[in-house]
Image: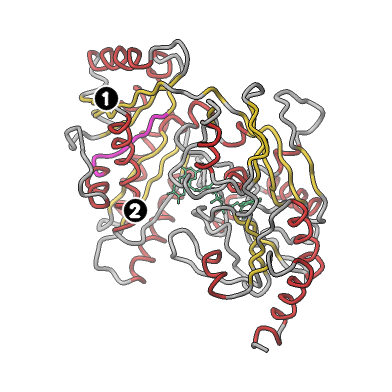
Amino acid sequence: MTVAETDGIGEHRLALQSALGDDIVLTDADAMAHYCRDWHGDVTSGAVAVLRPRSTEDVAASVRICRALGLGIVPQGGNTGLVLGAIPDMPERHVVLSLERMNRIRKIDADDFSAVVEAGCILWEMKEAIAEKGMFFPLALGAQGSCRIGGNVSTNAGGINVLRYGMTRELVLGLEVVLPDGSIFDGLSTLRKDNRGVDLKQLFIGAEGTLGIITAVSIKLMPYPDKVATALLGLASLQDAISLYRRARRDCCDLMSAFEFMPPLAFTLAREAMPDLPIPIAPDYPAYVLMEISGSGLVDIDDLMQRFLEGVMTDGLVVDGTIAASQAQARNLWLIREGMNEGQAKRGSHMRSDISVSLSQLASFVADAEAAILQALPDCISVSYGHVGDGNVHLNVLPPVGLTPGERAERIYQAKTVLNEVVDRYHGSISAEHGIGRLKRPDFDERLPETHRKLLTAVKHAIDPGLMMNPGCQLNFQPKS
Ligand SMILES: Cc1cc2nc3c(=O)[nH]c(=O)nc-3n(C[C@H](O)[C@H](O)[C@H](O)COP(=O)(O)OP(=O)(O)OC[C@H]3O[C@@H](n4cnc5c(N)ncnc54)[C@H](O)[C@@H]3O)c2cc1C
């Protein structure tokens, strides 16, 4: 008998195995390690067990036995969340429940413009299966090869197409959820209009697994946009990028599907990650925009992009630009955006943020925040980029090389404190798209208005009176012993 089997954890493991079987319950430390480490590998944890159900009934049975044992449940999708929402912080009291084996597409209905998918479907694989039917699911983010639709719904993920199609919330038609008492909320409708009282599914979208476990999702589909034009543009300032965005929405008939802002440092960072990446524009303009318009059917997207750029260049709003002539060239332009993330990671641990302010204040916010960080931390570099159309900026701060881990951690903490102060002044959000998880809990808690806290507490206690769902995530509700 091992040490664990003689203590409380060992008893819990035996009880889980006897209720659910060895196929569902993992307890081996090596096998569990992968589920107990965050995306960047900065934080590792442990768990009583990792549960890997194959069906909604398995999830319900898992919830019932965890409830009987007084164990907290941490749901996990692709574990790509960047705020420590999907790994336990009390390894001796929490299980991880991975949805990875619930990855079936239940239905794709092109006539109804809808699909029903299980929560563990990997976003990219699901989109490929949908594309084979000539349809399109517009959620698109850097982690799409690993994140899972249940995780996307639980974080209300954003990504590059939000300006046209909305956050995940706007793409969800219905949900199936296992509740903390083991019962199943069957709300998998594909109706687009349904005003029969309160829309209960909304409670679980963005709840980060604190109210129940999403097991299946019905989603909206669009016709596949087989015509796409992508351009990389050099501009004189971020303010010009915002003016360009406003004009593009009008001139391009709201067919714009992406509009990303990047600083000139993006090219250096991207090349640090991908040395052979082609950079088809002079790399020293003050600001860059990566813009995409797309559509299907009778519209001439290439002509629209061409005429739009002629107009804005004539008016001096865009200084320089290049339009991708092929899918491969478009892919290379997007690799600059993705490569700059990898380049930052290569420079070591740094302060990552995910902020939104109103669009009209975005340029002055970035200027103020970068100035405040420069004043407080003159040896650090700020990198601001993001989804301009959503007022969403990732303002990251890179400490210099050669610091000790303690010095880096201190710089990161100081940068976050300075940045949050500027965000508060602008009445912005400290989490535009990644959620709260455990990482941002103190900052969220500190800023939570009393009425919001009362409502959140009332909802939590009503749905999860045992406080067993994702304890420690968003707010610090821990399970009762
Ligand atoms: C390279 C990279 C790029 C990214 N880009 C973006 C971006 O552009 N926009 C954006 O919004 N995010 C982005 N993210 C963050 C992340 O990919 C998203 O938050 C994503 O939606 C998380 O999905 P997941 O399946 O990995 O969830 P996980 O990380 O596994 O879980 C996230 C949270 O949801 C809960 N959860 C997971 N599945 C369920 C379920 N079935 N039921 C109940 N609760 C559940 C977890 O407990 C956790 O609290 C990025 C991450 C990376 C690594």
Determine which residue is flagged by label 2: 397
Residue in the picture at 35% in, 49% down: 341
| Residue 263 painted magenta | yes
Q: Amino acid at mark 2?
A: Val
Residue 380 location, x and y as percent? Answer: 28, 56
Determine whether 41 is above or below 446 in the image. Answer: below
Q: Which residues are magenta?
A: 258-265
Residue in the picture at 79% in, 64% down: 67
Quadrant for the N terminus, please: bottom right
Residue 202 location, x and y as percent? Answer: 70, 38
Residue 297 location, x and y as percent? Answer: 47, 14
Q: Amino acid at mark 1?
A: Ala
| Prevalent SS, magenta region | strand
**Which structural element holds mark 2?**
strand
Determine which residue is flagged by label 1: 325
Q: CA distance from mark 1 to mark 2?
A: 35 Å
* Horizontal side, residue 174 vs residue 81: left or right: right
* Horizontal side, residue 279 vs residue 23: left or right: left
* Callout 2 crowding tier (Cα within 10 Å): few <14, some 14–19, many ≥20: many
Along the viewing direction, whichever of 439 and 29 lies nearer the viewer: 29
Along the viewing direction, whichever of 244 and 212 lies nearer the viewer: 212
